Image (cartoon, rainbow, N blue to C red):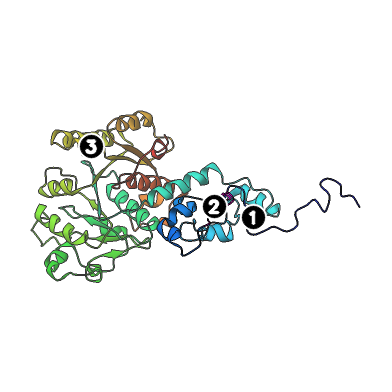
Amino acid sequence: MTDLPGGFRAQQRFSDPMAELPGEWTAPTPPAGTAVPVAGSAVDDAAPDQQRPDRQRPDRQGPDQQGPDKPAFDLSTAALLGTPGRGPSAGWRRWLYLASARLIDLGESPKVLRHNSLVERARRPLRGCYRIAMLSQKGGVGKTTITASLGATLAGVRGGDRVVAVDANPDRGTLAQKVPVQTPATVRHLLRDAEGISSYADVRRYTSMGPSRLEVLASESDPAVSEAFGSADYTQALGVLEQFYSVVLTDCGTGMLHSVMSAVIERADVLVVVSSGSVDGARSASATLDWLDAHGHEDLVQNSIAVVNAVRPRSGKVDMTKVVDHFARRCRVVCQVPFDPHLEEGAEIDMERLRPATREALLELAAAVADGFPGAVRTAADRPEG
């Protein structure tokens, strides 16, 4: 029986394990009459690397490479189990995904993608303590409200980080009214007992915490206490807090010339200047930046964040585009927080009662703050829209 070329018998069904593999080195056959070194002989022991050229090629790679030089397979959860398809998280895209038995997946909407991007920015890693000074030369623009709502947003989105807001108003401040009161203690009590504070449990006795996990250290409200809260007091209080908190927000008074302001500005990592959408509010906020520039804080001004607060959809005759453009030329970021009936109440702030647009604006503000964390790399995509 004659085998056809390429037939069954022409196929190599078995392989010789000693046969040459493609790409492998094969020792040449010595000429007839040449002595072949025997293992253990003098020739073999004298020059082992000359007799085994493969030992001189440690970089030789192959599909059957074994040992520590072979790359380890990725044992991550995604590699072993794959990434489960979850589909869109909300909206009509989510409805279509479920109605089609998870066959039609259009992905997340641009709105959801932007929200997720803001959350990711706001959760940037942070080492040490980051100090935020909230400023305004004009009262009634919502500085204390922005302090509490920004702090609540940071505390809510940054899971394991502790966030505290300090009322550094030398007069009677209202920051403590933005969270449920859990203790009558004030910053004065903290300073009195500072030497005995050695743990977070110790300092927690002097703060009140809201549902968002934001803690507030109240200012002294007793009119009988005539001693003003000064620069040395703030420095000592901050020295205690920055040992146990990742973010410290300081709600300042309106007096830029008060002694406590020098300590607040000198210790601040970023300034947040709050303005209303009115003409006098914008002018006062701009005057605050002028004062800082005139007193040698140009770098803080360039890295500052301007917040235009309580912006209504139709803000009368004030051209908000020009207001935003003015601060955009002087500050790193300008954020607009829309008018919200819950914030207008002036009582305790419940983030769940805020309108979605307000929560999104505050998240944008929190992301802008986190963009300034040490080591953070800011890109054009990090700048808020509008």
For the residue pair 304 and 43, the one nearer the viewer reads as 43
**Residue at screen point 53% across, 57% down:** 36
- The numbered mark at residue 352 is none
Label 2 to label 3, Cα distance in Å?
87 Å
Label 1 secondary element: loop
For residue 190, what is the image quadrant?
A: bottom left
Q: Position of residue 171 (x, y in %)?
A: 16, 53
Residue at image point 87% right, 50% down: 3
Residue 72 as seen in the image, left or right of residue 340: right
* Dot 1 amino acid type: Ala
CB of mark 3 within 8 Å of CB of mark 1? no
Q: Earlier in the sequence, mark 2 or mark 1?
A: 1
In the picture as drawn, the residue positioned furthest to the right comes out as: 1
Circle 1 sits on which residue?
Answer: 19
Magenta span contains residue 151? no
Please identify, in this view, whether the residue under mark 3 or under mark 1 is nearer the observer.
1
Residue to which mark 2 is pinned: 34
> Badge 2 local density, few (<14 within 10 Å), some, or many (20+)?
few
Work out whether residue 140 can be spotted.
yes
The range drawn in magenta is 26-36
Q: Nearer the viewer, mark 2 or mark 1?
A: 2
Badge 3 marks a residue whose secondary structure is helix
Asked if the magenta segment contains residue 30, the reply would be yes
Viewer-closest of 58 and 239: 58
- Dominant secondary structure of the magenta stretch? loop
Q: Kindly state the secondary structure of the residue where label 2 is placed.
A: loop
Q: Residues within 10 Å of mark 3 (few under 14, many from 20)?
A: many
Label 2 – label 1 distance at C-alpha: 23 Å
Earlier in the chain: of badge 3 and badge 1, it is 1
Q: Tell me: 194 left or right of 40.
A: left
